[in-house]
Amino acid sequence: MFRLLRMEKKGKVRWRMMLFLRLSFIFCLSVMICAQFTGDTSSSFNDVKSFSLPVQTCGDFQYTDDDCRYDERWDQSDLHITNQTDTSGTVCAPLQLYAELENKGKERTVSDWKWELHKITSQQQPLRNGNVVDKGLITDKKSKTIYKIESKRSLQPGIYAFKVYKPEGYPADEEKFEWSKPMKLVKCREQATVSDLKKTEKEPAEPVKESGEEHEKNAETDQ
């Protein structure tokens, strides 16, 4: 009887030991699997290969083609109107008009910049072509970067505007010209000059004859 009880106790102890060992083995195996999975995932996220693609950029991309090349017909000069005859208020005709342009690019060498002076019908934007009253090439240089265009014609009343044409090869996608601001000349009354006034003052006035004297002279003539 006692032997049977002892054997039952030993069997329970062994069963508990085996259960403990199995649970311990399962726990350790689970920990190892989790650790392995976490390590592979971290290495996958962290193992990022860096690479770079060569990107070609142009210094003046707006003036070049896709290969950063300029048109050989253009010397890379870049003229823009910055000043002109001030016609704000009332400006009387006749008058000679001018405009100044600044070269914001390289020095002009071979490119021909042309200008025209138009007599237009309206100041409404965008300006439209009118009658060309004068034209020429932009060659008059005031300073290293400033050019001047001027019409030598004495212009009559009307609305005028300079039109500057960009040279061959200039990389303009849209309009290849630039307008100045409209300049309006009006007809004014002629005013007497100071010299005319002085001349009038120096001339002696004719004496006024009295009616009695004139009657006596007429009577003597009749006799």
Image (cartoon, rainbow, N blue to C red):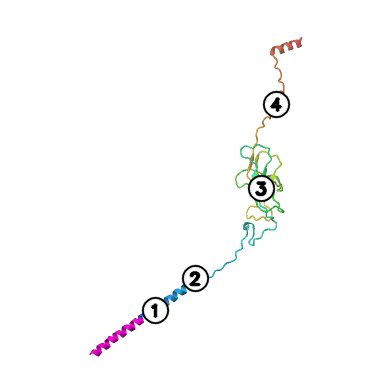
Answer with the quarter of the image where residue 185 lies. Answer: top right
Whole-Å distance between the Cαs marked 1 and 4? 125 Å
Whole-Å distance between the Cαs marked 4 and 3? 44 Å
- Label disc, if present, on residue 198 of the rendered structure: 4
Q: Read off the residue under disc 1.
A: 28
Figure label count:
4
Contact, mark 3 vs mark 1 (Cβ under 8 Å) = no
Whole-Å distance between the Cαs marked 3 and 1? 86 Å
Residue 222 x %, y %:
76, 11
Q: Is residue 19 magenta?
A: yes
> The residue tagged with tag 3: helix, strand or loop?
strand
Answer with the quarter of the image where residue 171 lies. Answer: bottom right
Q: Is residue 42 left or right of residue 61?
A: left
Q: Read off the residue under disc 3.
A: 101
Viewer-closest of 50 and 62: 50
- Label disc, if present, on residue 14 of the rendered structure: none
Position of residue 17 relative to residue 147, above or below, is: below
Q: Read off the residue under disc 2.
A: 46
Position of residue 205 relative to residue 50, above or below, is: above
> Which amino acid lies under the numbered mark 2 shown in the image of this protein?
Asn
Viewer-closest of 133 and 99: 99
> Which amino acid lies under the numbered mark 1 shown in the image of this protein?
Cys
> The residue tagged with tag 1: helix, strand or loop?
helix
> Which amino acid lies under the numbered mark 4 shown in the image of this protein?
Lys
Part of the protein shown in magenta:
1-22
